Image (cartoon, grey):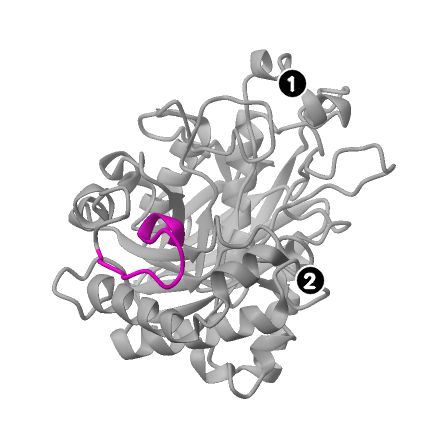
């Protein structure tokens, strides 16, 4: 479980939600242009990455993934030519210097992985990007062989403005050995009924009509066939949730295309259920976008777990997930009925007799407008439990202990309870044989 951070990230606050953090590390903060000397950890504006960012995060117990993004150096073909012509040796030197100082083998051990680019997309010249990626990856390997090298945002389908086609340069025999991790950005974009509808409105995670989880499945299938052993990280996923007052202040394209965020409660529900969907798959990490927002009614501008550093319901829900199942691993799907019921089983890594079932209704609504929508809930009987529950907890949406969820015994290994769109945690301890 991870989260995307930046300069104002408060490690002591967000450590309640996990121990993985990802940072956007602009090359044009390190140097004025490619070819300039690199002096980590000091930026060209004299900001010190160690003192001001990574050192504080590591001290709080975070493991940092650093996204080396090309902001300022990739705006147009003319800029490609101006900035990158003849800079192949510099790309190697930059990667080596950054990895040697920040990497896990360095004296400070500030970062453990490096992404080469954030979202260069198909707009970035492919041949040029292959050169940059290859040289920088080789430099990172030389600087710290223990550091993991991560692709930019990719997908195993036609690329677009935000993701490159994974089946392109990353299948090249020259490039395959140079990276360890495949990076995905996936957002639950609702299906557009007309071209005039916003492409940024989100749907619920399990919506069968959207690409949200299909992008993950396609990448895993490609990895298994072409690049076995590479890890899959979802380095961005998230949901925008602003206040009703902010929605009234929508402007520009958000108003013109009727962009809709989700409610605070839906943000909490959908983030938690996304983590469960990723846990079911062969995904090693998932980083929430974003840590904080200023309650702006726009895509990505209200996706924080906090609003002006005040926790939203999603903050408490993610905190609960981390504290409740942080030492557990996905075991199996107990049941998964589209539009009705999902139940997953998790097993404690240190004590396999400690079992958790999580149950929810895999349903939702595509906008934050009420439209007469009543969140689905149903009374269900779960059978075949490994033990009767020690506790059944509802999803946390505020500080303090999560509310207990009512349940009734329906047999030696069965219970009856109400299950809705907020996941319910059923915590059990399996009895030792003969007891």
- Residue at image point 59% right, 83% down: 226
Check residue 250 in the rendering and tell me which mark sits there, or answer none.
1
Residue 109 image position (x, y, % from top left)? 18, 62
Residue 61 image position (x, y, % from top left)? 20, 50
Q: Nearer the viewer, residue 382 or 185?
A: 185
Residue 388 is one of the magenta-drawn residues: no
Residue 36 is one of the magenta-drawn residues: yes
Q: Which of 335 and 49 is in front in this view?
A: 49
User: Magenta part of the protein: which range?
Assistant: 23-40
Picture quadrant where residue 98 is located = bottom left
Residue 223 image position (x, y, % from top left)? 57, 77
**SS label for mark 2:** loop
Q: In this view, does 266 lie above or below 218?
A: above
- Residue at image point 40% right, 61% down: 34
Measure the C-alpha gap from mark 2 to mark 1.
Answer: 30 Å
- Residue at image point 29% right, 50% down: 19
Q: Is residue 281 above or below residue 179?
A: above
Q: Is residue 374 visible?
A: no
């Amino acid at each position: 479980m991870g989260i995307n951070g930046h300069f104002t990230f408060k490690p002591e606050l967000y450590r309640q939600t996990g121990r993985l953090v990802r940072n956007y590390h602009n090359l044009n903060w390190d140097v004025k242009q490619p070819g300039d000397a690199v002096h980590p950890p000091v930026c060209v504006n004299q900001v010190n990455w160690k003192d001001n960012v990574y050192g504080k995060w590591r001290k709080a117990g975070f493991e940092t993934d650093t996204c080396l993004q090309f902001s300022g150096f990739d705006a147009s073909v003319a800029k490609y030519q101006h900035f990158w012509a003849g800079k192949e040796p510099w790309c190697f030197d930059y990667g080596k210097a950054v990895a040697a100082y920040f990497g896990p083998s360095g004296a400070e051990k500030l970062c453990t992985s490096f992404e080469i680019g954030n979202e260069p997309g198909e707009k970035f010249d492919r041949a040029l990007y292959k050169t940059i990626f290859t040289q920088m990856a080789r430099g990172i390997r030389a600087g710290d062989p223990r550091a993991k090298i991560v692709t930019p945002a990719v997908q195993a389908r036609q690329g677009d403005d935000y993701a490159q086609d994974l089946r392109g340069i990353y299948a090249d025999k020259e490039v395959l050995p140079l990276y360890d991790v495949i990076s995905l950005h996936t957002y639950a974009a609702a299906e557009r009924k007309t071209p005039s509808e916003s492409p940024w409105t989100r749907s619920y995670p399990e919506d069968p009509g959207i690409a949200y989880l299909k992008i993950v499945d396609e990448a895993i299938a490609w990895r298994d066939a072409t690049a076995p052993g590479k890890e899959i990280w979802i380095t961005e996923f998230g949901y925008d949730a602003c206040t009703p007052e902010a929605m009234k202040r929508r402007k520009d394209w958000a108003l013109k295309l009727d962009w809709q965020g989700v409610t605070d409660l839906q943000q909490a529900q959908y983030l938690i259920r996304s983590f469960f969907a990723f846990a079911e798959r062969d995904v090693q990490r998932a980083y929430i976008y974003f840590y904080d927002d200023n309650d702006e009614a726009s895509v990505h501008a209200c996706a924080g777990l906090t609003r002006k550093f005040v926790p939203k319901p999603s903050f408490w829900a993610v905190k609960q997930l981390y504290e409740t199942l942080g030492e557990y691993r996905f075991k199996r799907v107990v049941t998964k009925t589209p539009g009705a019921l999902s139940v997953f089983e998790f097993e404690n890594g240190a004590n396999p007799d400690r079992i958790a079932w999580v149950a929810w209704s895999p349903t939702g609504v595509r906008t934050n407008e009420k439209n007469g929508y009543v969140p689905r809930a149903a009374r269900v009987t779960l059978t075949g439990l490994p033990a009767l529950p020690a506790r059944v907890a509802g999803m946390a949406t505020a500080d303090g202990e999560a509310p207990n969820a009512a349940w009734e015994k329906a047999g030696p290994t069965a219970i009856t309870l109400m299950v809705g769109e907020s996941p319910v945690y059923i915590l059990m301890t399996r009895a030792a044989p003969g007891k």
